[in-house]
Image: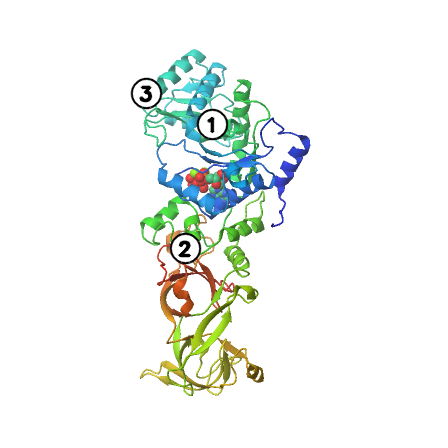
Amino acid sequence: DAPVISNFLRGIIDRDLADGKYTRGGLPNVITRFPPEPNGYLHIGHAKSICLNFGLARDYQGRCHLRFDDTNPEKEDQEYVDTIMDSVKWLGFDWNYGEKNGESYSGGSHLYYASNYFDTFYAIAEYLIEAGHAYVDSQSAEDMAANRGDFSKPGVNSPFRDRPAAESLDLFRRMKAGEFADGAHILRAKIDMASPNMNMRDPAIYRIRHAHHHNTGDKWCIYPMYDYAHPLEDAIENITHSICTLEFQDHRPFYDWIIARAAEGGFFKQPVPQQYEFARLNLTYVVTSKRKLRQLVEQNIVSGWDDPRMPTIVGIRRRGYTPEAIQLFCDRIGVSKSDGWIDYSTLEGALRDDLDPKAPRATAVLRPLKLIIDNFPENEAVACTAPIHPHHPELGNREFTISKELWIEQEDFMEEPSKGYFRLFPGNKVRLRYGYVVECTGCDKDENGNVIAVHCNYFADSKSGTEGSANYKVKGNIHWVSVSDSLEVEVRLYDRLFTDANPDAGGKDFMALLNPSSLETIRAFVEPGMVNVEPDTRLQFERHGYFVADRVDSVKGKPVFNRVTTLKDSWGK
Ligand code: ATP
Ligand code: MG
Ligand code: MG
């Protein structure tokens, strides 16, 4: 198993365990949650949160709840619920612990919907009103905004702040009953209009919204605000460590306040959840804002949410990333309390490190140029073999043939070699990898002077794997496929979607920073065994990089390959 990398959250959990803070009969000592709002596709930033929350639960034998934070009626959809569940599972995590591990330390399924708690949220709101901790405010939206003050000056109390609790309760019940239009009244927590923390200046906790909800239908026309609902969701589920991104740091006082008031009202027992903040993932060359990603999809810049250039989990998956590589990436970037940027190459590096030891090797010629072995017997095909993986002989060999006409890469021939060029040029010898040593004799050109074929002679006693091969010492070693047995396929060479490292940064027009060559579709020649490749198979095309048989467009017999990443980091160098 991978070593557990420590971080400040593990430090906090270790201390809580040592103190016995969350020793509660029948419940694990560590319960975390991943609480997406089902209003879009998950992206690589969410993967960080998933790996963190589910990873802590796994390592401390606790559990992690998958909770759909679906308290906002307008934006949510079943389609998103389904893809979010798929993405979490694909990343290798599971809220059905009992089922998966057999150990059942957590006991079954921990899939939750915040909208199932609407009755509890409502009961707590009535309690808050009765206890003098909340009031119905009937100011206009403009007055409320003006009276809120700002960082430089305290707010002004609403003229409705001290209305009797009974009056607020009556109004709140009538809000619920549908007597008022949207915006006519709101329910606010009664805290402190002079607080230096704006989130404590009597925040709104319920608003009127005559809107249909995907789970509760038309039952409600008042909906809780996120800052009110989220802490209560955590408390209802007995969460121990509620981990969120740094922008919620200023919301923590209200998080604690609301849970404390509800606990006083007998809704929750101590110990209650605690919120901790970590730095969100910012990845160079990537935008993660939902609005911007939607723009890319809607303006057909990409082919959809799962386009292999998208930073969505479905896109990254289709690109060919493995869940193991994503987990490795998340482990490597760690968890900190200060914002920073992670270079995109860190993600690619994690993929290379994950795939190098396990990806089968294969040959692909991406920019084909014909090589003719003039002294090779006509119509003859000599069997060649190559290891499926150089470090795993037990995986066996792949088989193909060499014959008179081959495809090589255009860049493996230069009529006039530059300094230090060891590949094919007239008079030079190279090894055709897993085949013979050949000596270049010249080339054919079309009327425009473009090279259209290269000529060479081979040495019949130089075949790789035979005794004679040792007598040939050459510096160049190039790959090739036979014209006669190779398979012509579509290959999609993906690259970064943006040319700017921070397309999302303030003020920039991200649509003006698109990389015009983020996708190049080519026809390539691959070795014959590729005909049987299953969709989703990841391979290393030797000398080129890591590729995957596209999970959507690839069929057995007619594979389509996506480039996941090149072998080396060549960007910005
Ligand atoms: P938005 O607020 O734009 O709707 P969101 O990214 O906040 O989107 P949520 O569904 O609310 O989406 O996020 C679910 C969880 O994922 C939250 O707990 C959030 O902290 C976490 N998360 C979102 N983006 C990142 C990121 N870039 N890095 C780490 N965690 C993230
Ligand atoms: Mg959200
Ligand atoms: Mg959010």
Give the residue number, with chain letter if any, for mark 1: 228
Evaluate whether residue 409 shows in this view: no
Towards the viewer: 214 or 399: 399
User: Which label's residue is closer to the chain start, 3 or 2?
Assistant: 3
Evaluate whether residue 468 shows in this view: yes
Q: Residue at x 52, y 83 (%)?
A: 462
Horizontal and vertical percent for residue 252?
54, 31
User: Please, what is the three-letter code of the amino acid marked with disc 3?
Assistant: Gly
Question: How many marks on residues?
Answer: 3
Numbered disc in front, either 1 or 2: 2
Give the residue number, with chain letter if any, for mark 3: 178
Kind of element beneath mark 2: loop
User: Please, what is the three-letter code of the amino acid marked with disc 2?
Assistant: Arg
User: Please, what is the three-letter code of the amino acid marked with disc 1?
Assistant: Tyr
User: Which label's residue is closer to the chain start, 1 or 3?
Assistant: 3
Q: Residue at x 32, y 82 (%)?
A: 448
Kind of element beneath mark 3: loop
Give the residue number, with chain letter if any, for mark 2: 309
